[in-house]
Image: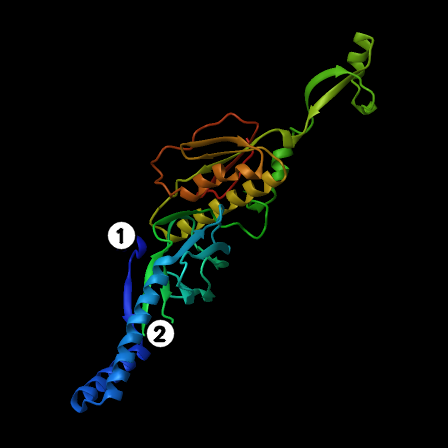
Amino acid sequence: MSFADHYPGFRLRITRWGLGYLIASVILGLAAVNTGNNALMALLGAALGSYVVSGTWSRQVLGRIKVVVRLPTEIFAGRPAVVEIELANTSRVFPAYGLVIRDGDGRTVVIESMLATGERSSHSVETVFQERGWHDFGPWRLEVSLPLGFFVKSKTVASGQRVLVYPRLLPNSAAAVRRGGGRRSPDALESRGREGEVTQLRDFREGDDVRAVHWKQTARQQRLVVVERQRASERPVFFVVDPRVGDPADQRQLDRFERLVSEVATGIVRRLKEGVRVGLVVGQTVVPPVRTARRSPVLLRPLAEVEPMNPADPPPVEVTAERRMVFSSGRAAADDR
């Protein structure tokens, strides 16, 4: 492998200790040359040898330390995301001392005092993304200064990664609903006039609730017939987001739009946890209903990527569904249609 493969983004800087040692070595060298003193010559040789040993050691360590950075599969804006970092010393000769990993802002995120040959270590680091959408993660840097600390050598790790941050989840789990100036839970709208719809008639079975008997059909067919009704949770609910805003340059409207996106994301996460099938419409994007929280990324991704649109842009795609909640930043409302 080439130098660039072993040392991507390689940097070298001298430390204060290293600079002081270098100046002392130069003075020692001048004194040794001018006086011809054998003891000074020996000290000069030792000083230069220490530079060679330190430089070779730290370079070998830097090239043999492998760093693996694992990001969580789901990252929400405003919430700590736990980044898993694994360091491995693949050298068979040189133990590693004083390893430091710094983030893109130069803050220290990992310190590993010593890593023996063939040894691994794992670390967990929390980072927070304040805004939804795509973000560049890294680059972070691995630094090595020991064994003697004359120089700090570093290389790039965790570079070139793109992460998608989902919308911020609101503290109150219920998505807001405004109608006529008031606020109430969307659950009340979803269940209104729909709970208990007849799905089929069938013969009575042992264990059935007597209250489910359909007496007219029982009398007509001369056998017990019961009614099966569909629960509200068995019918999918579609969240419909209208991304059009009155003035995309108005910061207050943009803030209201971000709040709307967070409300929708919060409602989706809650309903999936309850086992409700959830579908999504964001502008011209339609996501068919899913039921499990494991499938939530297919719903959260369009919300993470959506951008405010102009009023002249097309309205959201119409979907045929019994339970629809329409969210518009212009109205900041949800309607059951």
Q: Where in the figure is residue 213, as x and y percent of width and height?
A: 80, 19
Residue at (48% x, 36% y) in the render: 298
Q: Which residue is the extreme one toward the top?
A: 221
- The residues bearing labels 2 and 1 have C-alpha atoms spaced at a distance of 26 Å
Q: Is residue 276 above or below residue 12?
A: above
Q: Which residue sits furthest front?
A: 38
Picture quadrant where residue 193 is located:
top right
Q: Write down the residue under mark 1.
A: 2
Residue 25 in picture, x, y percent from top left: 25, 82
188 relative to 171, above or below: above
The 10 Å Cα crowd at callout 1, few under 14, some 14 to 19, many 20 or more, is few
Label for residue 166?
none
Q: Earlier in the sequence, mark 2 or mark 1?
A: 1
Q: Quick check: 186 left or right of 160?
A: right
| Residue that badge 2 annotates | 149
| Residue appearing at x 28%, y 64% in the figure | 11
Determine the image quadrant of residue 218.
Answer: top right
Say if residue 179 shows up in the picture: no
Helix, strand or loop at mark 2: loop
Residue 215's x, y, as percent? 81, 16
Relative to 222, 18 lies left or right: left
